[in-house]
């Protein structure tokens, strides 16, 4: 080997690997810092890239299709007056709006999400939960997805059954026509393609809870995260 | 057919080197395609089948690592080690080539060395972040908040690296003959003299020594 040969290759390799591994510590803050830039770039591409935006997670082969004429939201279980709401009936209830942050348990976040829908209290006023009811089991049209939240959690001021996102009716990937929103918890608690709300005495385990995820999915302090 | 003047063929990549390249390339393409279906919302809606694509992605990653290990176990390790040494060492000509692109180059030019080094680092980082993504879903002690973001960034970097690699190996007229080296193993001597004169010189000296 000649005298002027330098081992830049192994140095470069080790530096890249070390830099890459260290980014596991700083990539989140860095991407949040860059997100105004990257999400603007992504919007230029017609939201082709989910930079600073949504990723769509499903558990089955195809996403449920929403048919406004046949869709019903069943609200039953431990209630005085079970209801079966049509899409129009749901939209006729008093409308609430909010802007909140959406956190996914896998590590991505969408800021300033504009939701519109109904507060759960409106639905509870309709069906009159029995005193024994403590939680709601949310059932998705995407079988076998379901999850649950307690009545106390559903009375949070920013808990919502959303039917609009960004001023538009909820699209198919976002759970048309209605999904659960609770910004304090990770997104897996917010059942999409909702078809049934069953009021129950004890909170059952949902799809991801059966796979080892926490029942209470508080952002930053559940599922192995500590803030 | 008329006889053509015989052009000497120089053996550039051994079977082991080519096997390593194609294992890596084919696995990467499957991982990229399945990964994009998981990542891009438009594809997620169009194609769906997320559980299947997730399985394809994870099992391809396992097959990729197993195949790399197999090549290392069954292949010509001495040759691979010698290749690694070549890629590791940069001489004054390499540094000059990076600045002015005129200096004579060995079997790998400085750009190819950098490509190999970055690709190897990306492979390690993809494997590590991918492991945390896969295992963190099963055991929350292994859940790293930023693993997904880093995995995505690696995809963007490697995607553009791949585009450059494909341009130089398939399209750019003066470099695309190098495709012959990674498919058939050899390149024409006249081409090698233009692009890798120090390597040709080495081969000639070795022939004389024999």
Image: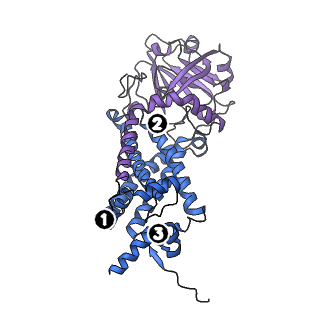
From the rendered image, report the letter of the chain displayed in blue: B
Q: Quadrant of residue B116?
A: bottom left
Q: Quadrant of residue B4?
A: bottom right
Disc 3 versus disc 2: distance between alpha carbons?
A: 43 Å
A19 lies left or right of A193: left
Is residue B12 visible to us here? no
Question: Residue tagged by mark 3?
Answer: B197
Q: What is the number of the mark on residue A224?
A: none
Q: Are marks 1 and 2 on the same chain?
A: yes
Which one is nearer the viewer's eye here, B22 or A224? B22
Question: Residue tagged by mark 1?
Answer: B77
- Label 1 or label 3, whichever comes before in sequence order: 1
Query: Residue B210: x and y, percent?
Result: 32, 81
Question: Residue tagged by mark 2?
Answer: B149
Chain on which label 2 sits? B
- Label 1 or label 2, whichever comes before in sequence order: 1
Disc nearest the viewer among 1 and 2: 1
Disc 1 versus disc 3: distance between alpha carbons?
A: 26 Å
Q: Is residue B148 above or below residue B5?
A: above
Is residue A100 visible to us here? yes
- Label 3 or label 2, whichever comes before in sequence order: 2
Q: Is residue B31 above or below residue B191?
A: above
- Give the drawing colour for chain A: purple
Chain on which label 3 sits? B
Which one is nearer the viewer's eye here, A119 or A102? A102
Which residue is at a point 50% across and 55% down the rendered structure image?
B29
* Residue sticking out furthest to the bottom: B2
């Amino acid at each position: 080997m000649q005298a002027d040969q330098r081992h830049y290759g192994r140095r470069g390799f080790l530096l890249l690997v070390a830099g890459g591994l260290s980014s596991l510590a700083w990539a989140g803050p860095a991407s949040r810092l860059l997100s105004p830039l990257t999400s603007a770039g992504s919007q230029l591409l017609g939201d082709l890239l989910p930079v600073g935006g949504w990723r769509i997670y499903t558990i089955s082969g195809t996403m449920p299709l929403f048919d406004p004429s046949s869709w019903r939201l069943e609200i039953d279980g431990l209630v005085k007056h079970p209801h079966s709401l049509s899409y129009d009936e749901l939209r006729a209830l008093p409308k609430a709006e909010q802007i909140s942050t959406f956190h996914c348990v896998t590590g991505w976040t969408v800021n300033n999400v504009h939701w519109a829908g109904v507060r759960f209290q409106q639905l509870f006023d309709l069906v009159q939960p029995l005193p024994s009811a403590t939680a709601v089991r949310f059932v998705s049209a995407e079988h076998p997805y379901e999850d649950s939240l307690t009545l106390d959690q559903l009375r949070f001021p920013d808990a919502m059954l959303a039917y609009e996102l960004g001023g538009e009716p909820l699209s198919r990937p976002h759970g048309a026509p209605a999904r659960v929103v609770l910004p304090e918890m990770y997104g897996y608690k917010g059942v999409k393609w909702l078809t049934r709300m069953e009021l129950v005495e004890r909170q059952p385990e949902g799809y991801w809870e059966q796979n080892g995820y926490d029942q209470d999915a508080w952002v930053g302090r559940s599922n192995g995260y500590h803030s | 057919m008329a006889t053509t003047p015989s052009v000497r063929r120089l053996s550039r990549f051994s079977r082991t080197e080519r096997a390593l390249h194609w294992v890596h390339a084919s696995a990467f393409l499957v991982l990229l395609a399945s990964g994009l279906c998981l990542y891009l919302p438009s594809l997620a809606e169009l194609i769906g089948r997320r559980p299947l694509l997730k399985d394809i992605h994870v099992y391809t990653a396992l097959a990729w690592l197993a195949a790399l290990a197999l090549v290392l176990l069954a292949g010509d390790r001495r040759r691979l080690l010698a290749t690694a040494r070549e890629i590791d060492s940069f001489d004054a000509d390499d540094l000059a080539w990076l600045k002015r692109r005129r200096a004579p180059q060995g079997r790998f030019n400085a750009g190819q060395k950098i490509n190999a080094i970055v690709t190897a680092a990306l492979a390690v980082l993809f494997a590590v972040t991918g492991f945390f993504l896969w295992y963190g879903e099963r055991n929350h002690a292994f859940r790293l908040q930023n693993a997904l973001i880093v995995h995505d960034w690696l995809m963007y970097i490697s995607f553009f690296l791949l585009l450059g690699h494909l341009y130089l190996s398939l399209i750019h007229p003066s470099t695309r003959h190098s495709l012959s080296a990674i498919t058939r193993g050899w390149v024409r001597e006249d081409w090698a003299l233009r692009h890798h004169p120090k390597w040709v010189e080495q081969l000639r000296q070795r022939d004389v020594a024999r």
